[in-house]
Image: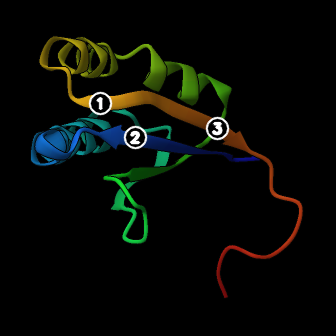
Amino acid sequence: MAIKILALLYPKPDKTARVEEIAHELASFVKENESGALQYEWFRVTDAETPTIAVWETYTDEAAVSAHRTSSKMGWLFEIAEKEDNFAQPIKVMTLQQFAGFESR
């Protein structure tokens, strides 16, 4: 069964454009290098009081999740985030377990 993850990022207001720039680079890397990533989409949360970004991720299995988390590009994300002081609060990563509803028709 596929593994679904929701990550919430809270960029500082003056760093939002930079985080979105980083997102494009990460998304390209994941698409080109992580065959176990079935879905990797970044969204602006439009009704949040402060800048918030949601990342919706779907992976084939735990090995794919591990490959993503330990990739050089993820290390780069955390390194650059600290160096540039991009976030107002820590990134929140949640693994989801579906219990109702459907994915598509």
Q: Nearer the viewer, residue 89 or 74?
A: 89
Residue 18 picture location, percent across and down: 10, 40
Residue 96 picture location, percent across and down: 72, 46
Residue 34 picture location, percent across and down: 38, 34
> Residue 45: which quarter of the image?
bottom left
Label 2 vs label 3, nearer the camera: 2
Q: Mark 2 = which residue?
A: 9
Toward the bottom, the furthest residue is: 105
Proximity of marks 2 and 3: CB atoms separated by less than 8 Å: no
Q: Which mark is residue 94?
A: 3
- Mark 1 crowdedness (10 Å alpha carbons): few <14, some 14-19, many ≥20: many
Mark 2 or 3 closer to N-term? 2
Q: Amino acid at mark 1?
A: Phe
Q: Nearer the viewer, residue 75 or 54?
A: 54
Residue 52 picture location, percent across and down: 37, 52
What residue is shown at x 37% (from left), y 70% (from top)?
46
Q: Amino acid at mark 3?
A: Met
Q: Amino acid at mark 2?
A: Leu
Q: Is residue 82 left or right of residue 56?
A: left
Proximity of marks 3 and 1: CB atoms separated by less than 8 Å: no
